[in-house]
Image (tube, helix red, strand yellow):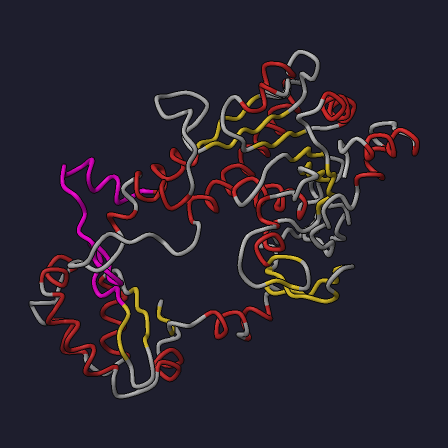
Amino acid sequence: MTASGRPPLDGIRVLDFSRVIAGPACTQSLADMGAEVIKIEDPDGGDDGRRLAGPKVGSQTHFFLAFNRGKKSVALDIGTREGQEIIARLLPDCDVLVENFRPGVMKRFGLDYASLKERHPRLVYLSVSAYGQTGPMADRPGFDPVLQAESGMMALTGDPDGPPMRHALSIIDTLTAVHATSAILAALYARRDTGRGQHIDLALFDVAIAALGNAGLYYLSSGTQPPRSGNAHMTSTPTNAFPTSNGLLYMAVANQKLFAEMCRSIGRPEWIDDPRFATTASRTQNRPALFALMNAVLATDTKENWARRLRHLPVGPVRDLAEALESEEVAARGMVRTMHHPDVGDFRVLGSVYRLSDTPVGTDEPPPLLGEDSDRVLRDLAGCDDTAIAALRAKGVVG
């Protein structure tokens, strides 16, 4: 079968007011799938991610480059009457609006869903906020680490005798972006049948609570807090990072079949029938004894040799980012790609996870410079001529 050649979201236009991670990561996925994403940025500095600390590629921050490929940037002050009029001209041709301001901010600009839904009944409108549009915390700002703390997620992380610890990545933002993408696609699918768009209220706190998964059910089923287990697992053994002669090897041999195969593969079949290790429950109860035996065996060889020997099991070396991102398997899957940026030249980015057999995804378009597409979008979509654009720029409405 010949691929259609059209990305799955070809023809969908997204007006993106979001900043930092959760919203931009969502709209980057939509861009990967072929949507035209018009990123509306404050002329005074743009997306907060453009100004964060850390390494840069030329003049561009690594943070902004991570979440904004394939978009068009329009530098527009939506706090002005003229800026709001420009948005009003763009909206009739847009299918999706994404924003992640605090509840009430878009209403001040006349751009909240309630103000738009009668004039734009087909618009899918996504609001991402820390605590949702309703509820006792709706007025509060919130960032990923605080939500990890408040949701109970931090209490699950860290060594058993140590303090709670946050996940190093912005894991709640990332999960929210995935849910946001799914919700937008579901709403577009529903619109096909109903002819109507709708409002999506997505809260980072809700996502964090839902992400508790089996740990949340551990508490709801027992009334007790799951124990912190460090690199191990609260109910599965042996799941842990084990020392080898040159580093750590991670194993997740969570069931009886996998445990038995692991024992045979490392030359210790007698552990299979050892009453201390014969069941998942007994292995968890006797975890220190089992780990001591495994440490002694695994210390006799390197993590790479053990990984090859145990290739048929869920086992792998603990890598740093250089080892992971420069690995053969990352290259083979195209998960690190080279792009060309007009300001910085060639640079590398993480690839798209989507692989569809008939409708290609992914983009080679780099993240935009601030306001790179202002003139083009205002001319082609908002109906502004060069004189009008120049006047708006002179007033600071357009950057």
Q: Which residues are magenta?
A: 212-240
Residue closer to the observer: 327 or 70: 70
Q: Is residue 129 above or below residue 335?
A: above
Q: Residue 288's image quarter?
A: bottom left
Q: Residue at x 25, y 57 (%)?
A: 158
Image coordinates of residue 257 in percent, x first then y, are 25, 64
Q: How many marks?
A: 0
Q: Is residue 322 above or below residue 109?
A: below
Image coordinates of residue 375 in percent, x first then y, are 84, 39
Q: Residue 329's image quarter?
A: bottom right
In screen coordinates, is 382 left or right of 189?
A: right
Q: Residue at x 72, y 67 (%)?
A: 346
Q: Residue at x 59, y 59 (%)?
A: 62
Q: Residue 35's image quarter?
A: top right
Q: Is residue 224 magenta?
A: yes
In screen coordinates, is 149 left or right of 95?
A: left
